[in-house]
Image (spheres, helix red, strand yellow):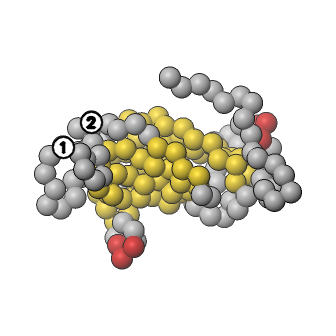
Amino acid sequence: MTRELTKEGPVSGCCAGKVKLVTTITVDRIDGLALPEGAKGTLDPYIVVRCEGEKVQSVTYKDNRSPVLDFMATFYRKTPANPIIIEVYNKNRMFDDYLSEAKVDWPGSEKGDKKVYNLYGRGKEVDMMKPGNVTVYIRSSDDPQML
């Protein structure tokens, strides 16, 4: 069961730092995923969205190479220049496979912006394009009450 967060907000205090931007990102869909080379079985993807040390994870989408996620997360950002990372994994019985990631470096506007990002590897494959792309809708404001 999901619920709208209406009274939650950033942690405040002398050591917490000042929130500069509130960003709501909706991961709409992922298209064209593929199993890693040499892997067998079904593709059961899920995503992990990371921003400034925080992370949220979606449910797993069974046997689906182009899942419609409609997955939303809100982040209270102190360093908005750092990108939001969307990591894509394949769920397995023992160990999950990392598939790819997208770096969302556009903060969005108050009205919201829809963008499509290509998926890439990490580490030595950071510049290597991977199968698929991710569609996101992103809204940001310096006023937490606007979103």
Mark 2 vs mark 1, CA separation in Å: 8 Å
Horizontal and vertical percent position of residue 56 = 52, 45
- Could you tell me which residue is drawn at 14 percent across and 46 percent down? 41
In the image, residue 18 above or below residue 31: below
Q: Secondary structure at mark 1?
A: loop
Classify residue 25 by image quadrant.
top right
Q: Nearer the viewer, residue 3 or 80?
A: 3
Horizontal and vertical percent position of residue 74 = 63, 42
Q: Which residue is mark 2?
A: 62
Query: Mark 2 or mark 1: which comes first in sequence?
Result: 1
Classify residue 137 by image quadrant.
top right
Q: Which residue is mark 1?
A: 42
The answer to whether marks 2 and 1 mark residues whose Cβ atoms lie closer than 8 Å is yes
Horizontal and vertical percent position of residue 47 = 41, 47
Q: Residues within 10 Å of mark 2 (few under 14, many from 20)?
A: some
In the image, residue 70 above or below residue 92: above
Q: Nearer the viewer, residue 120 or 17?
A: 17
Left or right of residue 41, residue 24 in this image: right
Amino acid at circle 2: Lys
Amino acid at circle 1: Thr
Q: Secondary structure at mark 2?
A: loop
Query: Residue lying farthest front?
Result: 94
Left or right of residue 98, residue 93 in this image: left
Quadrant of image for the C terminus: top right
Q: Residues within 10 Å of mark 1 (few under 14, many from 20)?
A: some
Query: Residue lying farthest right?
Result: 14
